[in-house]
Image (cartoon, coloured by chain):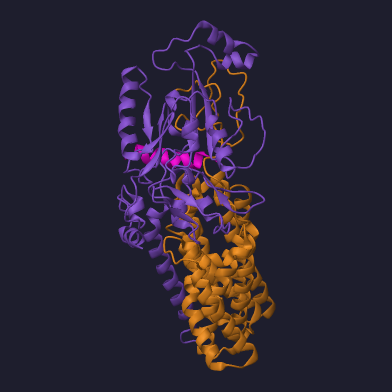
Chain colours: A purple, B orange
Amino acid sequence: MTSIAKSLGRGAHPRFANGPDPAHASGYDHAPPRVGFFTDTSVCIGCKACEVACKEWNRVPEDGLDFTGMSYDNTAGLSADTWRHVAFIEQRKPLGGQVNGPAAGAWLDRGDAAESTMVDDPHGFRWLMSSDVCKHCTEAACLDVCPTGALFRTEFGTVVVQEDVCNGCGYCVSACPFGVIAQRSGDGRVWKCTLCYDRLGVGEEPACAKACPTDSIQFGALDELRLRAIDRVSELHSLGITDARLYGDDPDDGVGGAGAFFLLLDDAEIYGLPPNPTVTTRDLPHMWKGAATAAVTVGAAICLMFVGRRP
Amino acid sequence: MNETEVTMSGQGTGQGTERRSGQGTGRRHRQPEFRSYYGKPILKEPTWEARDIAGYLFLGGLAGASSVVGAAAELTGRSSLARTAKLGAAGAIGLSGVALVHDLGKPGRFINMLRVFKPTSPMNVGSWLLTAYAPAAATSAFAAITGAVPLLGRAGTSAAAVLGPAVAAYTAVLIADTAVPAWHEGRHEMPFVFVGSAASSAAGWGLLTAPLAETAPMRHLALLAGTAELIGSRIMEKRMGPVGEVYGTGTAGWCMRAATVTTATGVVTAGVFGRKHRAAAVGAGLCLLAGSALTRFGIFHAGVASSRDPKYTVGPQRRSMQSD
């Protein structure tokens, strides 16, 4: 209740009730250090081992064999049946100082007139790949709005759905600013990444991190990952890859920082991520006040209509 | 910002990659500040059924406001209006319960709503509210029809009248407390639109069901609440910025325009002809009820539409970052 009481009292204050240690704020007295993911997309090779490992370990159902036309992304996005999703974006610019051979330009200039007029001047080529996942936000809107308490904060600081409690109301689906959590068709409940809660409990790292061959997905204590990420961004900048930036690492952002943060090579929206996500709960105290005012107003207004008018 | 990405879809229509042919320089009119991942939505659209949830927004509002009408009517000697208002409240909240449980992914687990008490979840607070309100409304109606248990009936009427406005208003918090742009950005005005709509529908129900001699307060309420509902919706749409356009297009646009027509018709008919002509009162009542329902469905569909197009998420967020 403490964190709830605090969040109700704060209004639109930018600092949140949970602070950097949401597990402690949720009532765990002796929680282990907060863990999460640092996904360094600059080394992702798009192998999708993470998608497969996640599905295998968690026995997530198959959700369509589609050809989307979105580069190598035939998964399309996160859902109840996809908890790791690799995004692919092809861009006409070099990666840092990389020189792409003339073959690259020629390959892209083949084909119909429409293609070659779009690609008027080969400026190099780069392929952005990123493995998306639930952000396990410090201030998690899904958790805040869940009416049954099915969504809860674990001792590791992660956010997990209890599938035996969830009654499929779908409120979390509309509350998540990243569009992660979703309802499973035919089942009715919502499902999402658990950060392999069952593996963490026995000292193992999540399946996706284990399977990732390039260590694009790094798992560990969040503090340590953040330091590593800052170093990596500096390294990339010094290599001429000035586009490199972190996403979700800032504790002052709209969700209090994420338990799963990223090193991206372009704006967030290019990857299908919201550029400035906010937890809706931040505005809730103001909304409750508005509702209270409206309720009092309508009650008074109706009564007023009856004053002094006997039939 | 690089504008020559091969597979970028910059128009945000959610239709995937769009090929643009016949461009001399390979460039065309773009809004450089909006980019997306193949035009795919960022948010998940609401899982709720319009019939169930927009229907509940309407029925819950009607019930809550009718409970206040019922109590006030009883206190001022308008027994027919009191009876029909109480019956209407009970009936509406009963139907609401059916709709809400039906909309769950696992309806058999509806009782899990009461596992916890959680102020950060408007749906949880609402569940507790309904748990207190619905029996009160039912008792009030039961006493009104049968004449039995008058004291219990009085208690029920009073409790329902106190809780009714909360029932009418909390749903605005429920839908605004999401990431859905057309709902969240309307959070300042939404409670007032909702209570206005609720009171308007209660006025309509009163005009429909009560004898002319007792419906003067309902005519006045129709004018006040109907106007508040319409003006409130307009103000909400305008003040939410570019997202507001979803209230004018598609199914949402149709509903909102129809709501304006029907509510306005109801208000005018009730005011001009409703005093002397029963048929006019009935017609006005139906219009007001329809108008209130249309407003709720319009707001619902607008929310769904705003969640489907990434530009409504990216645009406002980019703008808010620039202004920092």
The image shows residue A205, relative to residue B142, as above or below, that is above
Find residue A214 and report its horizontal and vertical position in percent: 45, 24
Residue B228 can be seen in this image = no
Tell me the quarter of the image containing the N terminus of chain B: top left
Find residue A106 and report its horizontal and vertical position in percent: 57, 8
Residue lying at the far front in this picture: please name it. Answer: A202
The image shows residue A274, relative to residue A267, as above or below, that is below
Of B312 and B269, which appears nearest the observer?
B312
Of A63 and A286, which appears nearest the observer?
A63
Horizontal arrangement in the rendering, residue A94 relative to residue B10 (left or right)? left
Residue B310 is inside the magenta segment: yes
Q: Residue at x 55, y 57 (%)?
A: A166
Find residue B218 and report its horizontal and vertical position in percent: 56, 78
Asked where in the image residue B39 lies, by quadrant, the reply is: top right
Q: Tell me which secondary structure the magenta stretch mostly adopts.
A: helix
The image shows residue A259, relative to residue B6, as above or below, that is below
Q: How many marks?
A: 0
Tell me the quarter of the image containing the C terminus of chain B: top left
Residue A120 is inside the magenta segment: no
Residue lying at the far top in this picture: please name it. Answer: A102
Magenta residues (range): B309-324
The image shows residue B151, relative to residue A208, as above or below, that is below
